[in-house]
Image (cartoon, grey):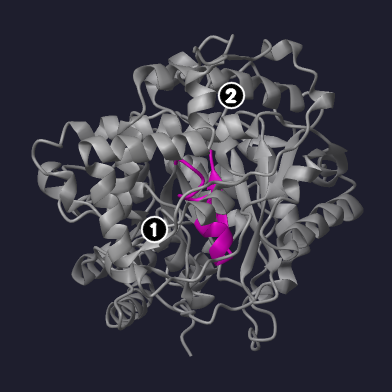
Amino acid sequence: MSRKKRVMLPVAEVDISNIKYTPQHIQAPHLTGFGFMLFTWLMEAPLIGSLITSFLKHKNGVTEMLRNTVIPERPMFRPEFPPQDPETGVVVLDEDRHPIARLEAAMECLPLYDPSRHWNPDRSSNFLYWTIRDYAHAYRSDITTPLIVAERIISAVDEFNGKKPPVPLLISFNADEVRKQAADSTERFRAGNPLSIIDGVFIAIKDDIDCYPHPTKGATTWFHEVRTVKQDAVCVSRLRSCGVILVGKANMHELGLGTTGNNPNYGTARNPYSFERYTGGSSSGPAALVASGICSAAVGTDGGGCSVRIPSSLCGIVGLKTTFARTDMTGSLCDCGTVEVVSPLAATVEDAMLVYAAMAGSSRADRISLNPSPLCCPNLSSSNNLNILQSVRLGKYTEWFNDVSNNDISNKCEDAVNLLSANFGCQIIEITLPELEEMRTAHVVSIGSESLCGLNAYRGERKYSELTLDTRTSLALFRSFSAADYVAAQRLRRRIMYYYMEAFKKVDIIVTPTTGITAPKIPLSSLQYGESNYETSGYLMRFILAGNLLGLPAISVPIGYDKQGLPIGLQLIGRPWSEASILRVAFAVEELYLGHRKRPSQFYDVLQAT
C-alpha cells in the first residue's frame, strides 16, 4: 500500500491567521559514558545504524517532512534577499576603505566617552565590564600598557590550564608571541602613534578560523595535520591591521557540531558564572574568555546559533550574528557553506560594534551575487537617535516566545521588551511565524550536509574514529540525508523566508529569548567521552535557527539572571543587512540594564589588577 502524501499549499496561499503553535520537542536518548560509546558504535554499523537513524528521523517527523510531503516552492540554495530600504540614522562605513578608516567612522557614532563612568574608586558597587575605549584611555593616559596587561592575561591563562580537571580556554597559545605583539603595541603608544582605537586590545580567535602562525584544528586532535595554515583569515587580517593583540585559538565544540561546548579532546570550557555548567557552544572558549574579563572581544562562527549567540547568552555577554555574507569567510573551515558566518562576541554592544566595523566586508563574489546593502553603524550620538527608537516596531510571537524551560527566561525577556516600549516608545506587535518545525528540519539537513561535504575531502587521510563520539553520531545522522532530502530542505528554506519577509512588512525587529534554557549542568560522566542530549540542544537552539537558515542578522544582549544567578539573553532578529538597526536597539537594551549586571564568579580584572 502506498503512503499518502502530505501536500503543502503554495506559501502565498497559507492563511497565517489560522496557524496554531505546536510546542517543539526532540525525541532522542540522553547519552554519556559507556552507553554513549555503544550507541555510537551502533550508529556507525552499516545495517543497524541505518535502522537507528531511520527510527529517530521518523519519531521527529523528519522523514514525513522531507520524503512524504509535496513542497511546491522552488529550492533556495542560499539566502536570497529582496531589496531593502536604506536604514535611517546611520553612518555608512564603506567596506572598500581600510579597517582603520572604518573604525574611525564607527567611533563617531558612539556617545561621548566619559572616563568617570568606569574609572572610579569603587567599581565593586556597580559591576561594569571594561570597554575597548577604557583600554584606549588607560594606554593613552599611561595608567598601564599593553605589555603589562599581557602578563596578567598570561597568568590567567596559566591558571585555567592548571585546573583539575583541565578547563583550557585556549587550544593554541604562545605566551612569547602574545608578549611580542604587546611589546610592539606598547612601543606605538610610547611613540604617540597607536594604529586605531583597538590597538592593544586583546582578542581571541575561535579554532575554526585561521590565525597565523597558530594551527587550525577545529578542536580536533588531527585536522591541523591535513590542512596547513599559511596566512590569516580575511577577518583576522583586518583586525591585525588595526593593532589588536591576537591571544590565540580559543576552545570550541569539536568542528562546531554541538551546542554545549563539551570537548573531551582538550577539556570542556566552564561557564564563568558557575563552573559546574556549560558555556554553550560551539564558541565555548571565546565566550568564556570574554565573560571572565580576559579578552575584550573574540571572533567566532555562527552556523546554528550554537556558535555565537547561545554561548553569549549563557555567559552573559553580547553576541552579534551578522547577515549571511556580510563578512568575507575566506580562511575559516566553513567558508563554503550557506548558513554560517564569522561574527564578534564582546562584553558590550559598543565593543561588538567596533569589532564588527573593523572585520566586516563582503567578498567580491558575494557582492556581485547578493548585492548587499551598505555597511553601516547606528549613529548613537545623534540627537535623532531617540526619535528613531520611538518608531521601531517590535514583533513578538507570544506562544513561541513563552516556549521555554522555565518562566524566569520568558518573564525576564518580557520585562525587557516592555521596558523598551515604556522608555523609548517602541511599539510591540503580535506576529505569527508558521512552520517552525519545518525550519528546524531544513536547517539540520543544510548545515549537516554542508559540514559532511567539507570533511569528505579529508576522510581518506584520517578516519572518523579519531573524532569525538558526539561528532561521530552527528556525522552518522548527516550521512543518512540524501540529495533529495537536501533539495527538499531548500524548498522549505524558500517557504520560511517568505514568512519572515511578510512579518518584516509589519515589524522592524523580531524579539525572542536567545535560548529556551539557561546554562545546563555538565555531567561528570561527559568529561571523558562527551555527551549527546538533543532535548537540551532543542531548548538551546529553539529561537535562533532563522538567523542561520535565512541568513538574517541577530544579536543576543544580556538582560538579567534566573533564580540560580545564571545569565539570560534577549535576541533581536533584523531584516537582511540591518545590523545597524539591531545594534541601535541592543544598545538601548544594554543602557536599561546597565546597573544590573553581576560580576561572574570567575573574573580577572586584567586592566586594573588589584
- In-image side of 211 versus 383 (left or right): left
Check the image and report above or below for 67 versus 522. Answer: above
The numbered dot on residue 373 is 2
Quadrant assignment, res 399? top right
Asked whether residue 319 is drawn in magenta, I would say: yes
Pick whichever of labels 1 and 2 is earlier in the sequence: 1
Nearer to us in this view, 490 or 482: 482
Q: Residue 499 in the image: state x and y as whole percent.
A: 69, 23
Q: Residue 96 in the image: state x and y as whole percent.
A: 45, 28
Circle 1 residue: 193
Q: Is residue 86 visible?
A: no
Query: Hey, what amino acid is under mark 1?
Result: Asn
Quadrant assignment, res 531? bottom left
Element under label 1?
A: loop
Query: Hey, what amino acid is under mark 2?
Result: Ser
Nearer to us in this view, 81 or 186: 81
Residue located 30% across and 53% down the image: 39
Check the image and report above or below for 364 versus 198. Answer: above
Residue located 22% across and 53% down the image: 220
Q: Which residues are magenta?
A: 303-322
Q: Residue 224 in the image: state x and y as whole percent.
A: 16, 49
Nearer to us in this view, 229 or 356: 229
Check the image and report above or below for 472 versus 322. Answer: below
Asked whether residue 530 is drawn in magenta, I would say: no
Q: Is residue 231 visible?
A: yes
